[in-house]
Amino acid sequence: GAGVSQSPSNKVTEKGKDVELRCDPISGHTALYWYRQSLGQGLEFLIYFQGNSAPDKSGLPSDRFSAERTGGSVSTLTIQRTQQEDSAVYLCASSPKQGFNQPQHFGDGTRLSIL
Amino acid sequence: AQSVAQPEDQVNVAEGNPLTVKCTYSVSGNPYLFWYVQYPNRGLQFLLKYITGDNLVKGSYGFEAEFNKSQTSFHLKKPSALVSDSALYFCAVRVPSGSARQLTFGSGTQLTVLP
C-alpha cells in the first residue's frame, strides 16, 4: 500500500530563499511528525500534529520555521530566509492514532541543500 | 532529561555470524523502546518495540532485542547476519507520559555485514 510520500526528494536553493517541503501521510493516520536529520546525527524533533488538536511546535529551532496541516492530511513545512545550517534531510512520519507506543511510518525525506 | 546512547558508530560482522547493535538509555520512569533501520536515501523503517511484558521482543527480518531494566539496555540482535542487513540502525526511547518531542533517538550505528 501507499506509504508516507514526501516532495521534493531533493531541493537545492540559495541562502535567503524560502522553501516549502510537503508530506502526504498514510491515509487515515491522524498523527504526523516532522524531524530533521543532519549528517552523523540522530533525528531532531520539529513539530507534531494530532487530529484537530493544536500542534506541538516545541521543536522548531527558530521563527523561520513553520508548518501547517490542512484537512488533517497533507502537511507543509516552510523555512523562510534559509541559512546554510538548515541543510539537512527533513523527514516526515505518521502513525495511525494517538498513543506514543505506536511505531511511526517514515517517508524517504527531502534532502535540502542551502548554497 | 532522557537520553539514548549507541556507543558504536560502526559495527562490522561477517555474513552468517551473529550480530549485536548496542543501545543504552536513561529515562525517569518506565520506557517505551524502539529500533528503526534506515537504508541509504530512505526513511526509517520500524523493526521492533518494547512497551511492556516479555523482555525479549521479536521483530521484522529476524531481528530481536532484549530489554534489560537493571542495565538500562535494549540491544538489537540477530543470530545470523545477512549482507542485506547492512544499514544504519537507530534506537529510540520515550516515556509513556511524555510529549511528542520526547521520543529521543540515538545517533545511529552503521552496520556493515561483510560477505
Image (cartoon, coloured by chain):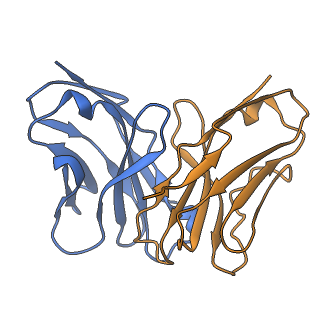
Chain colours: A orange, B blue
Q: Quadrant of the C terminus of chain B?
A: top left
How many numbered dots are placed on residues in this image? 0
Please tell me whether residue B91 is drawn above or below residue A73 in the rendered image.
above
Residue at x 54% of width, y 68% of height: A27
Please tell me whether residue B38 is drawn above or below residue A48 in the rendered image.
above
In-image side of B4 versus A45 (left or right):
left
Q: Residue B27, how many percent across, how many down? A: 41, 63
Residue at x 75% of width, y 32% of height: A85
Residue at x 43% of width, y 70% of height: B95
**A106 or B9: nearer the eye?**
A106
In-image side of A9 versus B10 (left or right):
right
Residue furthest to the front in view is A1
Q: Residue B80, how many percent across, how many down? A: 9, 36
Residue at x 71% of width, y 71% of height: A55
In-image side of A14 versus A99 (left or right):
right
Q: Residue B78, how many percent across, how many down? A: 15, 43
Q: Residue A81, how many percent across, how many down? A: 90, 39
| Quarter of image, res B113 | top left
Residue furthest to the bottom in view is A52
